[in-house]
């Protein structure tokens, strides 16, 4: 996937050394952006082996609205480092996607009451009833939560936009780990876009991505340089059963024609 390789090259050659909370320095670049035509294939990296099953389980977990990883950890351990002993997670993306706490004024009592908003449900309704809307925004950033969360949302907001009959998605990240996190994020949000497009009867458009602090941990540099020597091969295809989003299960997704190079081990910075 040329867009990813170009991103890695820019950060490694133009970024600056920067300290951060993990204790492992990064090479950091400000406000990186690229976009991918989803009609060219499902954007799963081919220059290293990606764990598609983990990505799919993560997206289904987001869509469940759960605020714990007790079910997710049966399939993948990717969130274990940030959960407590009981599996509870300060910042669970799906909780905010499906149950965002909104303070709304009760006109009868004059007091504010917390109402939970299903942002994904609202998006699907808008796409079906008012697809030209410019208000199809999903936020995972709740300021009060971000003050105490061990890991506030990195990919904190995304916007859907329809052009002609094509559904586009733009993701904004405050922070992006180029070696590990970004490849997962690209695939996850592209998968979500395809599933929603199918439900609302639209074709695929672009996945667009802005990363405010795009960084490479210094202990990932050698692995990424090795990856950059590998030649990408054609992207796989993703087939999704034509069912409502909230009824989709793991077996409703089929990755076709995924050929890739050997995996590269990158250590996660916690």
Image (tube, helix red, strand yellow):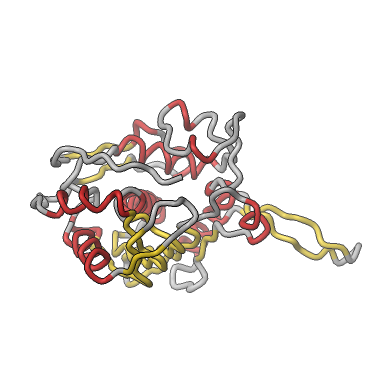
Q: Position of residue 92 (x, y in %)?
A: 55, 45
- Left/right placement of residue 69 relative to residue 222 reads right
Left or right side of 56 for 130: right
Image quadrant in which you'd find residue 34:
bottom left
In this picture, is 42 found above or below 36?
above
Residue drawn at point x = 34 percent, y = 54 percent: 217
Along the horizontal axis of the image, is 111 left or right of 51? right
Place residue 8 in its image quadrant: bottom left
Q: For the N terminus, which image quadrant?
A: bottom left
Residue 116 horizontal/vertical position (percent): 68, 52
Number of numbered discs on residues? 0
Q: Residue at x 34, y 31 (%)?
A: 251
Q: Position of residue 91 (x, y in %)?
A: 57, 48
Q: Residue at image x 29%, y 43%?
A: 266
Camera-nearest residue between 174 and 190: 174
In the image, what residue occupies the spot 80% across and 57% down? 113
Instruction: Please determine whether, in this image, residue 24 is positioned above or below residue 56.
Output: below
Nearer to us in this view, 105 or 259: 259
Is 248 positioned to the left or the right of 104 in the image? left
Pick the residue in front: 70 or 31.
31
Find residue 67 and report its image quarter.
Answer: top right
Residue furthest to the top in view is 74
Q: Is residue 194 above or below residue 27?
A: above
Q: Position of residue 177 (x, y in %)?
A: 36, 54
């Amino acid at each position: 996937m040329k867009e990813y390789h170009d991103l890695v090259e820019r950060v490694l050659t133009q970024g600056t050394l920067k300290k951060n909370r993990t204790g492992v320095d990064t090479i950091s670049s400000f406000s990186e952006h690229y976009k991918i035509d989803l009609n060219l294939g499902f954007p799963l990296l081919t220059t290293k082996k990606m764990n598609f099953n983990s990505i799919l389980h993560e997206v289904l977990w987001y869509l469940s609205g759960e605020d714990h990883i007790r079910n997710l950890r049966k399939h993948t351990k990717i969130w274990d480092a940030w959960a407590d002993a009981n599996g509870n997670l300060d910042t669970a993306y799906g909780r905010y996607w499906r149950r965002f706490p909104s303070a709304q004024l009760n006109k009868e009592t004059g007091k504010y009451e917390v109402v939970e908003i299903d942002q994904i449900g609202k998006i699907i309704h808008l796409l079906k009833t008012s697809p030209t809307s410019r208000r199809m925004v999903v936020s995972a950033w709740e300021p009060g939560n971000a003050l105490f969360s061990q890991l506030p949302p990195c990919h904190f907001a995304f916007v859907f936009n329809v052009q002609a009959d094509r559904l586009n998605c733009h993701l904004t990240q405050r922070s992006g780990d180029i070696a590990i996190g970004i490849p997962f994020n690209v695939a996850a949000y592209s998968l979500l876009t395809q599933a929603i497009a199918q439900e609302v009867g639209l074709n695929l458009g672009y996945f667009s991505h802005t990363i405010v602090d795009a960084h490479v941990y210094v202990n990932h540099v050698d692995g990424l340089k090795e990856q950059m020597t590998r030649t990408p091969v054609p992207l796989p295809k993703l087939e999704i059963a034509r069912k409502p989003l909230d009824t989709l299960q793991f077996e409703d997704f089929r990755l076709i024609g995924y050929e890739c190079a050997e995996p590269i081990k990158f250590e996660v910075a916690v």
